[in-house]
Each structure stands twice: as C-alpha cells, then as structure tokens.
Image (tube, grey):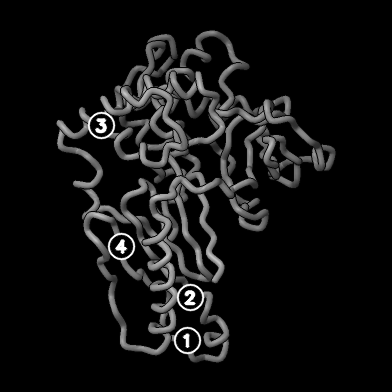
Amino acid sequence: MSFYCYSQRLLNPYRGIINCIRYRSAEAVTADGVQWDIYVSNEALQDKAAAGKYQVSDIRYGKWSAASGLKRGPVFPSADFRAMEELGATVYEHLLMVHEEVPFDFADRFELWLLDTEKRPLALLDSALSQADIDLEQSIVWTPGLECKRTFTSSVAGKQAGATATGSVADYLAVYVNNCAGSRSAAQLFERNAAGSGCGLGGINVGQALAGRLLPAEEFPVNLLEVMRHDAMHRHLLGDFISWQAPWLLLLPALPPELRRQYEEKARVQATRTAGQYRLYPEIINQAVIDAALVEARIRGTMPQQQHEETALSPFYIEQNPETGS
C-alpha cells in the first residue's frame, strides 16, 4: 500500500498548516496534531458514476484523537458506501501507526506569489502539491483575515489616516500591502526546490519575460510577507503584524534559530493560539517559553483538547473565500 504523509500551508489568510495522511481517495487531516478528521472522496467511484450506477458522494468516515478514540460518521446501507468505507478504514489504521510523527514534511512546493511593482515576491497567496492545483483565475488580493480584523492592533495605528476605529488597522494593512503590488497587480507561480530557490512558471497578469526566471531563496520572504522594503512607519506596522502571527509562523520549517526564538517570545503572549499549534512546531528553541504559554492556556481552561468535540475540519480544510477566511 502507498501512503502519502505531508504538510501543507493554509493561505490567504495564512492561518497555520494541515498535516495529511493520504491513501488513494481517502485522507486523514489535522490542524493541531491532536484531532484528526478522516474523509473519503468519490474519486474511486467515478467509473461507476459515468455508468449511471453511482450513489454515494464524499463521506466523513469519522474523527479520532488519542484521548477520545474513533467516533464514526454517518453509515449508509449501500455497496458504494462500503467500498469507500474500506478506504477510510485503511487510512485510519495507518493513522494509528504514524500520528506521533507529525509534523510531516511540507509538500506544497508550488507557490503563487503576489508581486510588487519591481516584480519581486511580495506576499504568498496560494500553495499546492502540483501545478495543476493552483487556480490561475483566482483573486490576487492579499488578505490578513477576519481574525486579524478582530484582534490585531499596532503601536503606529494613530499615524495612519483613517486607521483609528476597531478593525481599521487590519483594513489599512490590507490596502497598503495590495497597493505595493501596483495599479495592475500580478501574481506569479513558482516551483520551489529543496534549497529554497524558485523557478518562475505562469501566473496572473504576468508577461512571458518572467517565465523561466530563477530566483534565489532569499527573494522569497520567510514570513510569507515582505516586510523590509518599506518606509520606517510601515516596517513597524508590518513588524507588529508578523509578531501577531507568531503562533502560526512558528509552524514554518525554514525559520533561522534566532528568528524562531524571537517568535517564541512573541507567541508567549498569545497563549491560547500557541497551545493550539505547538504540537506541529518543527522545532522549539526555548521550551520554557512555550511551556509557560501552555500553563497559561490551561489555567484559562482553553486548552485545545477541551474544544475538539465542537471542532472539525471540512473536506476542504478551510474557507477559501478571502472575505470569509479567518
């Protein structure tokens, strides 16, 4: 049997990663390393669908955690369902063997980047396991998300015209970043290699002159958002946003050790978010800082395992509409 275990980023807005175990058309996915959701798509039955014999669409096989065990999804009395259920059971059995090995290696090496006016990578909009999985008809507007609008603020907010009301700092940030892409924004698809450099492929509003270009790893912002080529006030604003994103940025494997240490300190003040992510951190530099966040989250009674009964990933993992992303 051939199982594929990998990590993939959740993007635009960036809100962490999923770890996935895939076998044929069945998947087990987790966003926190604790609660797993198991789905089976109808791909295995498409031949029957063409023959007019198809009855069952995608199914949710169940959800599993080490603490609660397996809780099955709905059961349907049909031969099609039983065939799909066998795939779900196969993924579930493999999950029991490998769930402690998370985080898996990242596999989403095809990346769609919003470009700045100099045609350099500005903000990561999308990523996928294959080039065909990138939608080149999607909106290329970068968004920080609704959670940012609810909770993000900045010490330079008062210097931004119109950015004084609740949520307007995030709105200002979104407008500013997208304005950095120019009046006719463009996004280019890159295939990243193991060393981090990227080969330019197609894109949206991208001319043929950029196809095939090879950019070194340092041209791609490690934070998924370029934060240095700005004036002092906007560097400060973007720095505050990156600090706010620290619990999620710590999930990325390419952070230099000193930067990871800084982000751990920033994540410490967001105890609940850190407690929901830390099991998928590829490395922890200062364990005491992370432990302090976990203790605080436990005291608040908001450790993720207390919320799992009400939380599940959809087959598409997150909302993909930028206006509804959180």
The mark nearer the N terminus, 3 or 4, is 4
| Left or right, 322 with reference to 131 | left
Above or below, comparing residue 202 to residue 56 in the picture: above
The mark nearer the N terminus, 2 or 1, is 2
Say what amino acid the circle numbered 3 marks.
Leu
Pointers 3 and 1 in contact (C-beta within 8 Å)? no
Pointers 3 and 2 in contact (C-beta within 8 Å)? no
Say what amino acid the circle numbered 4 marks.
Lys
Name the spot of residue 235 as percent of width and height, x first. 52, 14
User: How far is disc 2 from disc 1 in space, using C-alphas?
Assistant: 9 Å
What residue would you read off at disc 2?
Answer: 42
Name the mark nearer the viewer: 3 or 4: 3
The mark nearer the N terminus, 2 or 4, is 2
Say what amino acid the circle numbered 2 marks.
Asn
What residue would you read off at disc 3?
Answer: 294
Name the spot of residue 239 as percent of width and height, x first. 47, 18
Pick the quarter of the image with the N terminus: bottom right
Q: Which mark is residue 63?
A: 4
Q: Residue at x 36, y 41 (%)?
A: 279
Pointers 2 and 1 in contact (C-beta within 8 Å)? yes
User: How far is disc 3 from disc 4 in space, using C-alphas?
Assistant: 24 Å
Q: Residue at x 61, y 56 (%)?
A: 133
User: How far is disc 2 from disc 4 in space, using C-alphas?
Assistant: 19 Å
The mark nearer the N terminus, 4 or 1, is 1
The mark nearer the N terminus, 3 or 1, is 1
Say what amino acid the circle numbered 1 marks.
Tyr
